[in-house]
Every structure is written in structure tokens, then in C-alpha cells.
Amino acid sequence: DAGVIQSPRHEVTEMGQEVTLRCKPISGHDYLFWYRQTMMRGLELLIYFNNNVPIDDSGMPEDRFSAKMPNASFSTLKIQPSEPRDSAVYFCASSLDSFGAVVTDTQYFGPGTRLTVL
Amino acid sequence: DAKTTQPPSMDCAEGRAANLPCNHSTISGNEYVYWYRQIHSQGPQYIIHGLKNNETNEMASLIITEDRKSSTLILPHATLRDTAVYYCIVRVPFLSGAGSYQLTFGKGTKLSVIP
């Protein structure tokens, strides 16, 4: 299994530009998460999807951020317009719903996209 | 989620066992102990989790005290590739009906494996 795939790995852009981050979850996983990691705030959950439907977007910082999941194998996180304070590493993670006696919601993370907004 | 306390850093000789402690004295009955690690410039990686029994998988062992107020992650034969920040997280699994998917990472323990 290739694991969670994210692109690009690095993105440098100028303030005001639109940024699109992409994620391909592990095949068969039905939960997808977008996180942001900074030194100051640590790892923050921005939004998550279940079966392509956004469930909780309370972590999305403001209207400049939007996320979509058009199908089970692809999701995007868009920032428009971008600002220097958006500079961070953005992680995508996926998880498989589990049923039965074993309760687990292990999340598998991608390598991240390091975003720098100048 | 219960608060956890971990030492900020530890060293371990290559080939020896690495024992990483975690205190979670306010853990509640339905909270699990999870361990993740983050190798430099990579995404967090799940290691192991448990409720009250000791657990072992291909990566590590998890020892939880009988009163569940502390636990130890054991890497039986540490290698240089195990150098990373290790996070102990106590949380209610979402699928149990009362939890959240948010993984709250504290500062963790920076483990340095020395040749």
C-alpha cells in the first residue's frame, strides 16, 4: 500500500495567491482528515470527512480556507487568499471505520505539505 | 481528554531497549492510551494503543499500570531510525460514541538513539 499521498511536498507562494493542497487517502479508508502543524500551535485538526461528506469543519480557521472531497480517493484543501500566517505544514490523514469488539480509530498520516507564504 | 506528562528528551544506545514513560493520572475509565511518533519532516505515525491490558505489536510494547495512571512504551531494540519525537495521547476513541477525532499532541519526548 502506498499510504496517504500528498502533493505538493513543498509550496512557496506570495501573499494573496490561491493555494491548493491535494491528498489521496489509503484505498478503502472512509475517513479523511486535514491537519495543520506549527511550532506555536502544534497539530490542529481543521476538518474531517466521512464517506466524502464533511462532518466537522469547526477547526477551519476562517472563510479563506475550504476543503472538498469529490470522491473517495481525492481531497483538496484550498486557501484563498493566502497570508503569511498560513505558513505551516499541512497533513492529510485517513482512517478506516472499525466495527466489532476492537475499538480503534487509528489515523494514518501523509508526508505533509510544507507551505510558505511570503 | 486527559492531560499527559512526558520527559522532554531521552537518549538510548542503539540495540538497547528504549523505555518511554508517560503519566496520565487523571485518565478516565473510557479513555485509551495511544502512542504516535513523528520522525523529522514526516507525518505522525501510529505505534500502538491500549485500554488496560499490556499490548504488543511488531513495533513496540505498551505497559499500562494497574491503576492506569501511567504507561511505558518499549522499543525492544532501538535503531537509529527510531530517533523521533514520541507522543503519548489519552483519548476516548471516536467510534465508542463519545469521543472526538482530534489528536491532541503535547510536546512529547524527543528520543535520540545513539550509535
Image (spheres, coloured by chain):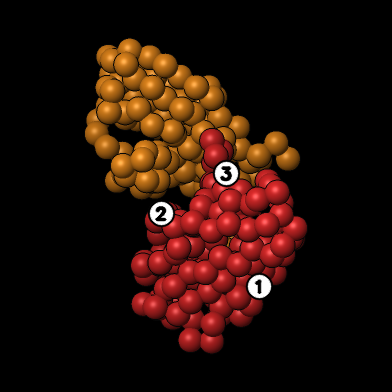
Give the residue at x 48% y 76%.
B70
> Farthest bottom residue?
B66
**Between B12 and B43, the one nearer to me in the picture:** B12
Pick the residue in front: A23 or B83.
Answer: B83
Q: Residue at x 57, y 44 (%)?
A: B39
What residue is pinned by disc 3?
A: B39
Both marks 1 and 2 on one chain: yes
Give the colour in which the image draws chain B: red
Q: Position of residue B11 (x, y in %)?
A: 58, 57
- Mark 1 / mark 3, whichever is N-terminal: 3
Q: Which mark is residue A66?
A: none
Q: Secondary structure at mark 3?
A: loop
SS category of the residue bearing label 2? loop
Q: Answer few, some or many: residues within 10 Å of disc 3's Cα (few below 14, many 20 plus, some between 14 and 19).
A: some
Residue, x 53% and y 74% (percent of image)? B71
Subunit of label 2: B
